[in-house]
Image: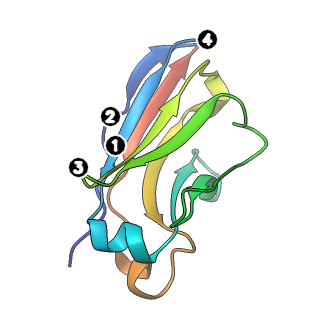
């Protein structure tokens, strides 16, 4: 099955930035809202950002003002720009549909690890 593969994670210091990428076909962009999710050790996976088919974005309070979700339809890629990273942003980050149901239910990839040191 095709899975959505997030990439771009790494180890950074607090205050630094990272940009995550997720290849998504244009047909998916035009039909579904998409989101970025994260799962910290010992916690449930939560949505941190989403973007609708019309490009309307929404953010969890914990990342609002620091993270920016975007999509490049021409290059079939969704991004998550993460600025001013904090140690509490440490998690495995995933991309998937919003909501991650139906066709998206089994599309969780391995995610990409983001580790922020203090």
Q: Are marks 2 and 1 in contact (CB under 8 Å)?
A: yes
- Could you give the CA–CA distance between mark 2 and mark 3, rounded to whole angstroms? 16 Å
**Whole-percent x, y for residue 112 in the image:** 36, 43
**Labelled disc at residue 8:** 2
In the picture of the structure, the residue carrying the numbered disc 1 is 21
In the picture of the structure, the residue carrying the numbered disc 4 is 118
- Could you give the CA–CA distance between mark 4 and mark 1, rounded to whole angstroms? 24 Å
Horizontally, is 33 left or right of 47 in the view?
Answer: left
Between residue 97 and residue 28, name the one nearer to us. 28
Q: Are marks 4 and 1 in contact (CB under 8 Å)?
A: no
Kindly report which numbered mark, 4 or 3, lies closer to the viewer in this rendering.
3
Mark toward the start of the polypeptide (4 vs 2): 2
Tell me: residue 28, above or below residue 57. Answer: below
Kindly report which numbered mark, 2 or 1, lies closer to the viewer in this rendering.
1
Mark toward the start of the polypeptide (2 vs 3): 2
Identify the residue shown where x is 32% and y is 61%.
Answer: 109
Q: Quadrant of residue 76?
A: bottom left
């Amino acid at each position: 099955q095709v899975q959505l593969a997030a990439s771009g994670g790494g180890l950074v210091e607090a205050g630094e930035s990272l940009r995550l990428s997720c290849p998504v076909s244009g047909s998916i962009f035009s039909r579904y809202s998409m989101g970025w999710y994260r799962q910290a050790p010992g916690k449930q996976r939560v949505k941190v950002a989403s973007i609708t088919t019309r490009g309307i974005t929404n953010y969890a309070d914990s990342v609002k003002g620091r993270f920016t979700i975007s999509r490049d339809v021409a290059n079939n890629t969704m991004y998550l720009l993460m600025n001013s990273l904090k140690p509490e942003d440490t998690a495995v980050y995933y991309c998937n549909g919003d909501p991650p149901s139906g066709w998206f239910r089994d599309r969780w990839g391995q995610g990409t690890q983001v580790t922020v040191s203090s």
